[in-house]
Amino acid sequence: MQLQDRYRIALLAAYALALHVFESLLPKPIPWLRLGLANIITLITLLLYGMRAAFMVTLIRVILASLFTGTFLGPTFIMSLGGGITSTFAMGVVLVLMPKLFGPVGLSLVGAFFHNTAQLFLAYILFIQRIEAILLITPFIILTGTLTGSVNGIVSAILIKNLKKKDEKIQNT
């Protein structure tokens, strides 16, 4: 990995961490409900720089965020790591297998679905251990994930479009 790639990943991870911290300051209607704003950076990284870079951004963000909040290796860390790895992997696989089928919004929805599914599975394993309780909250989780995934995908598409325009201007000068 070249120095420029390391710099790019560090910068993107810093953006993702900043969005994660910003989101933690927002009021939550439900204590565990998050908008997943940092996933915007993961999706942009995946689309512009590939799956390896997206995994690195996800891992750096999750680890640093958990260290800053004091949740490292605790249940919150495990839930965040599980959701982040699963969603990044799912989006990456879909992008590799069907590169023209999904744009940023579709990939974001794939990521949101797999993130939520992984977290529901981990919640079952670590906390709840009652399938009826998981099945009861699953529709709400999937619905909110669909809404936030759609918004995050739209924001990602706009940012990618603007980044590409900026790159074109730089290359033309």
Image (cartoon, grey):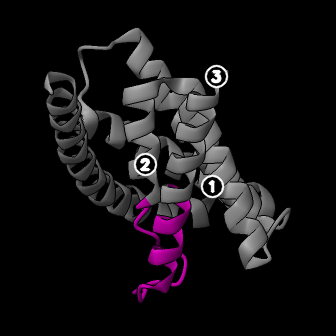
Residue 23 part of the magenta segment: yes
Horizontal relation, residue 162 to residue 152: left or right:
left
Type of residue at label 3? Gln
- Using the rendered image of the protein, determine whether residue 121 is visible from the camera's viewpoint: no
Label 1 element class: helix
Q: Are marks 2 and 1 in contact (CB under 8 Å)?
A: yes
CA gap, disc 2 to disc 1? 10 Å
- Using the rendered image of the protein, determine whether residue 10 is visible from the camera's viewpoint: yes
Horizontal relation, residue 71 to residue 168: left or right:
right
Label 3 element class: loop
Q: Residue at x 17, y 42 (%)?
A: 162
Up the image or down, 31 lies above or below 102; here it is below
Mark 2 or mark 1: whose residue is earlier in sequence: 2
Type of residue at label 2? Ile
Q: Are marks 2 and 3 in contact (CB under 8 Å)?
A: no
- Magenta part of the chain: 16-37
> Considering depth in this image, is 137 or 37 the residue closer to the camera?
37
Closer to viewer: mark 2 or mark 3:
3
**Can you identify the residue that label 1 sits on?**
61
Type of residue at label 1? Arg
Closer to viewer: mark 1 or mark 3:
3
Q: Position of residue 18 (x, y in %)?
A: 50, 67
> Label 1 crowding class (10 Å Cα cut-off): few <14, some 14-19, many 20+?
many
**Can you identify the residue that label 3 sits on?**
2
Q: Position of residue 86 (x, y in %)?
A: 60, 38
> Considering depth in this image, is 123 or 14 the residue closer to the camera?
14
Label 2 element class: helix
- Quarter containing the N terminus: top right
Q: Which mark is residue 41?
A: 2
